[in-house]
Image (spheres, rainbow, N blue to C red):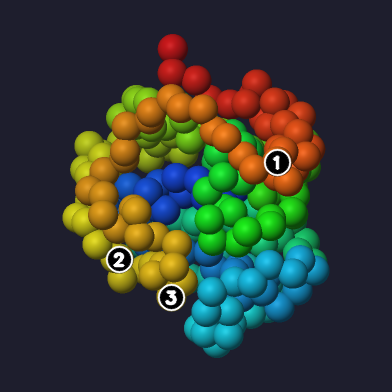
Amino acid sequence: MISNPTRLNVWSSPRNVSTAFMYSFGERPDVHAFDEPLYAHYLLRTPTEAVHPVKDQIIASQLNNGSDVINDIILGPAEKNILFFKQMTHHLIDIDWGFMTKTLNILLIRNPREIIASYAKVIPNPCIEDIGVALQQKLYHYLNDNNALTAIVDAKDLLINPAAMLEKICHLCDIPYLPTMLQWAAGPKEYDGIWALHWYAEVHRSNGFKPYIEKETILPPHLEPLAAECAPFYAELIDKSLKIS
């Protein structure tokens, strides 16, 4: 077992580049990647009415008590030097955030209009709790106040220059940057959650970060109020995000 591993939580909004980010780190020989270890905990406690594909199978496949996940997985024994936890911020229901002071923490953000447009393709009527950006803003203040924030990374900036952004992230995490992080084999990964079939089709067709393409995001009228509600939270976070310059 590794006595003092680097434990990195990446707190993402849904429908972001979080899976590609996980695959990037998963290409490192020194990384053990974990895909949304708090998902089952969240499904048993969420007050939202969104229907999640393979819900029962997810609950059966994971530890479903957040305290057990934290103690046994996030802060548990490590067989590699780096433990990478792809996390969804909205999974933080009924959980003491104190464990984050013992880990590195990156907030992975995305323009909420883009999140909503993508999320609604699977879950038609998302609410602000599903989108996660308001909780990301709250988490930002908690991490910042407790000296536990490593960086805020915007998906757009990561896709525009993945090599430079990954190098900067690795520097902040005090780990060496490896160019192998830029590519991976197409297809599923052994550490994918069992929900991958429903959510990861696009990233499974990829072998690296997709170039960012600027385009207008048009939402149906009934989702415009949600986008407006999310906008101020995103504005604060993007202002504090990591830049390449």
Relative to 41, residue 137 above or below: above
In this view, the mark in front (2 or 1) = 1
Whether residue 209 is visible to the viewer of this picture, yes or no, is: yes
User: Mark 1 or mark 2, which is nearer the start of the sequence?
Assistant: 2
Q: Is residue 97 left or right of residue 9?
A: right
Residue shown at 31% from the left, 71% from the top:
190
Of mark 3 and mark 1, the one earlier in the sequence is 3
Q: Residue at x 34, y 53 (%)?
A: 203
Is the residue under label 2 in contact with that under label 3 (CB below 8 Å)? no
Q: Amino acid at mark 2?
A: Lys
Seen at 45% across and 62% down, the residue is 199
Amino acid under disc 3:
Ile
Query: Which one is in front, 129 or 157?
Result: 129
Quarter where residue 181 is shown: top left
Q: Is disc 1 surrounded by few (<14), some (14 to 19) or many (20+) residues within 10 Å?
A: few
Q: In the drawing, what numbered circle is on residue 189?
A: 2
Local SS, label 2: loop
* Image spot of residue 164 (x, y percent): 34, 25
* Amino acid found under the numbered disc labelled 1: Pro
Q: State if disc 1 and disc 3 touch (CB < 8 Å).
A: no
* Labelled disc at residue 194: 3
Closer mark to the observer between disc 3 and disc 1: 1
Instruction: Return the residue at label 1.
Output: 221
Mark found first going from the N terminus, 3 or 2: 2
Mark 1 secondary-structure assignment: helix
For the residues labelled 2 and 1, the Cα–Cα distance comes to 37 Å
Nearer-the-camera pick, 176 or 207: 207
Q: CA distance from mark 3 to mark 2?
A: 11 Å
| Residue sitting farthest toward the top | 245
The location of residue 89, given as percent across then percent down, is 65, 53
At 34% from the left and 54% from the top, the residue drawn is 202
